[in-house]
Image (spheres, rainbow, N blue to C red):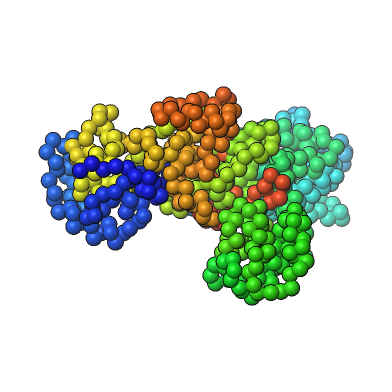
Amino acid sequence: MTFVLKSAASALAISCGVAVMSAAPAHAYTLMDMLRGDKQRTQSTIFMDQAPGRPVPRGAVGGSLGGLDPEAPLPKVSGPRYYTYKAETLQFVDTSKFADPVVTGAVADVSASGDASAEPAVQRRFLAQAKVRANADVAKALEAYYADSGNPLVWVEGSQINERAKSAMAALADAASVGLDPADYAVQTPDIDPANPDPAARDRALTQFELELSAKVLAFVQDTVRGRIDPNKISGYHDFQRKTVNLTPVLKLARMSPDAGAYIASRSPDGPQFEALKAELAKLRAADGGNEERIVVSLDKLLKPGESSPEIANIVKAIGKHGSETLKTDHAATLAAYTGSADYSPEIVSLVEDFQKERGLKADGVIGQATVRAMTGGDSNASKIDKLDVAMEQARWLPEDLGSRYVMINQPAFMAYYHNDGKEQLSMRVVVGGKNNQTYFFDDEIETVEFNPFWGVPQSIIINEMLPKLRSDPNYLDQLGYEVEVNGHAVASSSVDWYGSTDNVSVRQPPSSDNALGELKILFPNSHAIYMHDTPSKSFFKRDMRALSHGCVRLSNPRAMAAAVLGTTVDDVAKQIATGQNHAVKVPQKIPVYVSYFTAWPNKDGVVEYFDDVYGRDAYVDKAFDATSKARGAQI
């Protein structure tokens, strides 16, 4: 029987690992059933069609049975996992070389004489006795600075701490303003009794304070530049080259600065996105205990145009509070004329539709939970503050300057944005990976646009989703027009031993109107095989929750994105597609792409928007914060 790929079958195409299959005999379990997750059909059909120990087709190639029991559970390919976060190990700073060998032998004599000029030498001797723990980078910078006898103490002068120390401590105490935990950088001032005649006790306390404050300043600078946690220790879905922070000059610069606190604070990121997050955080912290009026909209089902609900009054009130000034101006007459009616009238529908549109929701006037969340501000102040802390940490994992031209994909927002000349010029809805097939969090560079692409089926899809059917019907992929290779040689699907290993087996779908990747894909080569692409399944873009793919990023307007990164026109892109031939075009200049995950992020107007934590990743970041603070609290 000849099978024809039909456009209707594309409705369930899922990127980075989803085949678009056509009609099959009524009795057959199809790959479309697999993609639907039709477990009952899987169990009732596959095992009826597949008799235990079914013989391998004559002439089969590929791996042998290798001792596998045909009745044993099918193999599975598992995705990355989340880890129990392990904080950086702290080590004792090697203070053995901190004393000046020239004066150490004479310290006792000059100390007894009461000569004030001898105090630095005495203090350096006690500095060598101080005990401080820090991570390896901070310890190295401390050892480099204090082992050089030509470097004076930074925070201590004579018998007291100096103004520079007080300024630095104030800056560290304000760490929360940039999303860090002030407790991580707290230092106790020396408890010195002016009436205590023991100068040794005083100098011992001062030098311990000197080294502790220097360690905290260096830790703050390192944290605010690169983040306080290592993202790669959170999960296998995080993939970053952690930044290297040059700590060597920090103490010298702090010592020479007329305002040490200002210098320390200046090390925080100052890009526009970070500044917007910082300003939002300050606003929320300044709110009256987070007790500002919160409007509640209670709907137990969808509210559609023409219906009525007592919640209409709260809906109008919520939009009046959280809608943009432009929206409220455009609908001023409607807002002013509303008298509390429960009718969902055309005027209120128009107001809701425009509100949905500006929030990136489907502008159909149907009010569901996503619209209610946007109307009511979504999160409490405390929840928003937590999201901002996480977002500011994650922003540190990316370059401080994202560049004048780049693509930002924000997974919780289900949106992609193209920036050029420092401005957002294009935005569109996207579909990202489902919770069981999550899209990674990383950055890369766009290099190529491929037109009329082949879809190479990942091993995870071959094993997890295709193998059950192929063991029942090894001819299945041949019937659907898929290309199969074993060790690089084209073979018939029916000739492959689907009971053996698939490591040397590759499967791909040729270009077609029903190809799972659609008309084009935009490539930024990475180890996760993630890219942006078209899809024949356009209906998914109408949904508010769009975590539906196998990991890649599907674009609602791929031609526009391709034109943007190629620096050409949509018409030219259309001509490339019209050739019907598979071919690739390199972008004129590589473009940064940030495949990001922010539940709080500013829009093009600098207004911070909040999104659902679709993968639950913020909780893992919070756990990493806690583990880090606990480890640092072990300081002595």
Q: Which residue is drawn at 34% across and 45% down?
A: 6
In depth, the one of 365 and 471 nearer the eye is 365
In depth, the one of 321 and 396 nearer the eye is 321
Q: Going by the image, does 110 lie left or right of 384?
A: right
In the figure, residue 48 lies in which quadrant?
bottom left
Split into 4 quadrants, where in the image is the N terminus? top left
Q: Going by the image, does 254 lie left or right of 409?
A: right
In the figure, residue 395 lies in which quadrant?
top right
Measured as percent of width and height from the top left, residue 286 is found at: 78, 59
Measured as percent of width and height from the top left, residue 448 is found at: 50, 29
Q: Residue at x 69, y 44 (%)?
A: 604
Q: Which residue is drawn at 31% across and 59% down?
A: 39
Q: Going by the image, does 192 lie left or right of 35?
A: right
Query: Residue 44, can we see it?
Result: yes
Residue 326's place in the image compared with 144, above or below, is: below
Q: Which residue is drawn at 43% across and 39% down?
A: 518
Measured as percent of width and height from the top left, residue 64 is found at: 18, 39
In depth, the one of 371 and 272 nearer the eye is 371
